[in-house]
Amino acid sequence: MDNRVKILQKYLIKKSWDAFIIPRADEYLSEYIAPYAERLKWISGFSGSAGIAIIFPEKAAVFTDGRYKLQIQKEVNNRLFSIHNIRDYYEYIKNHIPENSTIAIDPWLFSKNTIDKIKKKLFDKKVKIHFQDKNPIDLFWKDQPQRPLSKAFLQTINYAGEDFVSKIKKIKKELVKRKCDYFLVTSLDSIAWILNLRGSDIDNTPVNLAYFILPASGKTTLYTDLKKFNKPIISKLSPYVEIKGYKFLYKRVSNISSTSVVGIDDNRTPYWFVKELIKNNVKLKSIDDPCNIRKAIKNRVELKGAKNANLRDGVSVTKFLYWLKNKINIEKENEISASNKLYEFRKNNELFFSLSFDSISAFGKHAALPHYRATKKSNSQFSNDSIYLTDSGGQYFDGTTDITRTIILGSASDEQKDRFTRVLKGHIALASTIFSKKTRGSEIDYVARKSLQEINCDFDHGTGHGIGSFLGVHEGPQKIYKSNEHKDQYLEPGMILSNEPGYYKDNEYGIRIENLVIVKVRKDKKFYFETISWAPIDRDLILLKLLNNFEKKWINEYHNKVYNNLEKFLEAKEKNWLKNVTKPF
């Protein structure tokens, strides 16, 4: 990394730039990105999913959030980069970028909202922003991977539950209501949802690299690589959607009439579009991506598919837990071999497409890293009397799954049992919460933390994220997280979220329990969560004296459902084991 940073710093000096900002992002502002877009990793070594770096001619800084505080210290050379929490990013810019300086930015990798924040912080300093036509890292990254080119395919109506023509019509009506002539759909998951179109351009997320211009009236246009599409798909889409190559996108954007109103999502639209439209005096209107909320509220077919996918997935996870508890020779297994074993169980499931993210297989102290990824270098051998955490999921044609289980191999300490039980209490509290209409996830997050906070403990990540339908394993706008602002999306019936409180003791162990839940509404109009993930919770880690009667009842009822749902899919020994580990307290 030393040489890469120095090369870039020399380039800055040559161009008379005072700073170059590199986010962990692609040209679609995706959470998960293809290898060609891992520019932050190339320059800094940091491989986490959230981060940003600033390169100065004489120094460099890198930022990430609390999930990666230990990982970034391991991956990034602190002689080259100072390491910071991402919440301090904008203040750092304000304090460290000199007056009357020039900073370089790739406009494809930043949203309008992000650029506006940078401009606001630097306004008094009269800083000039140079928007680059070519990212300099692409100039120096000699073995940069090619852009992906997977074959596109259509999600069939028996899994989507609604055809793309109907979805387009609904979004067009929304644009008319919002008085917009166009909306720029730049988020890959939104494009996948509205067109029922899937692909494999991003690992574990079935999307295609593309942009979509949606007018309030008339034909829509998809801009992508035409090699991705076969004649049957083009034939089906063509009455409603024109498919063109990327080179036509630039011309189309520059030709939008100055009398038009173009809707953009400030958080999801690359700034390049904003820059080009402003240049042509086009009026911009900030609106939330209208696909977002419709995508989040699943229809009946999608909900049925989610339940079916989670049932099949639960069988795989349960078979894996049986293998861990009963079949392994501990000294011969490790994080990677265990992850591979779980993949073997999962990949043979009906309708399986891929994993939904790179599985977290974390033994011992690695479990204290919430987003740990085992590598050949870090791969830990298993041993007795240690915690193992597995967080994994699958993409199925009828749904997306995500589940975490923490188990003890051997015997647990009293402290580990205490922390595990407190995490379990938080999980149960959230799973059992009854709430009213117009409740935000941030307003109920506290119930998952209460038991831990009683002993001055907590976890530094959200408690729940949205889940897509054969789409992103992290989906907005629904989420459950700790915030005092309460500006997040109301929870609505039909949304799917994770319930995943945790506890992490640095360099020793980590605990997380995760199930997926559907937001439902009762006859009295109160809202509740229906759990749809099925796998046993490790009784060997439960400290029974910490549980009250309601919590014991919840566990017994959940385990009863686990057994009844899964037993017919298991072999005799697996079934007998499951019956024993799900017996009531």
Image: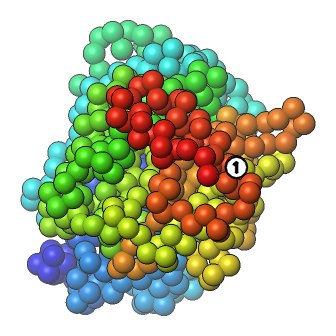
- Say whether residue 23 is visible: no
**Residue at image x 59%, y 21%?**
301
Residue 279 % position (x, y): 49, 53
Q: Secondary structure at mark 1?
A: helix
Given residues 572 and 54, the one toward you in this image is 572
Q: Quadrant of residue 211?
A: top left
Q: Tell me the residue at 53%/29% (across/down).
A: 565
Q: Position of residue 329 (x, y in %)?
A: 19, 54
At label 1, the amino acid type is: Lys
Image quarter (top left, top right, bottom left or bottom right) of the N terminus: bottom left
Nearest to the observer: residue 238 or residue 462: 462
> Looking at the image, is 297 positioned above or below residue 338?
above
Mark 1, residue position:
553
Crowd tier of the residue under label 1, counting other residues whose Cα lies within 10 Å: few below 14, some 14–19, many 20 or above: some
- The residue nearer to you, when weighing 455 against 573, is 573
- The quadrant in which residue 521 appears is top right
Residue 153: name its quadrant.
Answer: top left
Q: Is residue 485 visible?
A: yes
Image position of 93 with respect to 319: above or below: below
Rendered location of residue 302, percent (x, y)? 57, 26
